[in-house]
Amino acid sequence: MFAKRERKYKSTPNRLGVKGWYGSLKYNMEKYLYLLHRITGVGLAAFVILHVILMSSRMFGEEAYHQIHGLLMNPYTDIGMVIVTAALLFHGFNGIRLLLHEYGILFVRPKRPVYPYRVSVKSSGVRLFTILMIILAVLFFIPVLYEYIIIWW
Amino acid sequence: MKESYIRLIQYLLAAVIVVAIAFHLQLFSSLIGPGYIKAQTWEEVASRMDNPFYDGVYAVLLFTVLTHAFIGVRNVLFEFITSRVGRVVTSWTLFIIYVIILLLGIAEIVASAS
């Protein structure tokens, strides 16, 4: 019976893909943070590629740099940079949280889910630490906003 | 390479990025650095290009961020590419793009340092 179940399990791989990320409205906060971590990660990867390509104009001298820089001097780029910085801060602080949690630093290591599926993140101050990381990301975002407010004023 | 090693590399790179990116971003804060506008002027950019410390920071950032990004994108893509052939093609395609962007970044750092 178990062998049959095993075969059935192997023949039905997870094909939900990205749709699986949004699977349920019953997700807890950590699951939404996971979703946001993925989205910001993909966005930041796209930004990094664009950033390296655009900044490579430096090697062609001052004129080439000014040409590219002139194209980027508009309010849309500023708004884009605010979003990128917010995504970066979130991805960074959430990443630190995930690293500490995965290796059991400060908290107990995550366990394999066993019936009755108690959520481990609600214990040992893990949830509190998650909230602390979000607060830190928001606090670090304040100087970023300050910088852009200076420009816009 | 085993997936567990790739994951470990991903985590180690993340730890390095946190430190290296702090050096990069402090330039854009007028509270602790030149500020967003001044940091982008050619004079500031040229002075950083002549500074071996920033060349080092940029080299570390380029390698760590690009590697972390491409491993991350690969992980995301693997969530909905389940066939073995599809995964091999995805890995190699990403690797080729990764090498091209890395070489472009290295060329920029070398050119600006010399």
Image (cartoon, coloured by chain):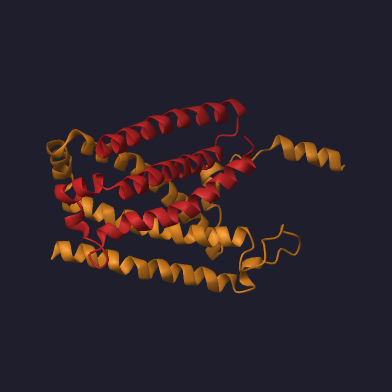
- Expressed as whole percent of the image width and height from the top left, the position of residue A108 reads 67, 66
The image quarter containing residue B84 is: top right
Color of chain A here?
orange
Left or right of B26 in this view: A40:
right
Image quadrant where one finds the C terminus of chain B: top left
Residue at 15%, 47% in the rendered image: B42
Residue B46 image point, x, y percent: 19, 45
Q: Position of residue A6 (x, y in %)?
A: 79, 40
Q: Nearer the viewer, residue A68 or A4?
A: A68
Residue visible at 46% across and 39% down in the picture: B70
Question: Which chain: red?
Answer: B
The number of discs equals 0
**Residue toward you, A105 or A152:** A105
Residue visible at 74% across and 40% down in the picture: A9
Residue A137 on image: x %, y %? 40, 66
Q: Is residue B15 visible?
A: yes
Residue A87 visible? The answer is no
B59 sits left or right of A65 in the view: right
**In the image, is B70 to the left or to the right of B84?**
left
Residue at (24% x, 44% y) in the render = B49
Q: Quadrant of the N terminus of chain B?
A: top right
In the rendered image, the vertical position of residue B102 relative to residue B21, given as above or below: above
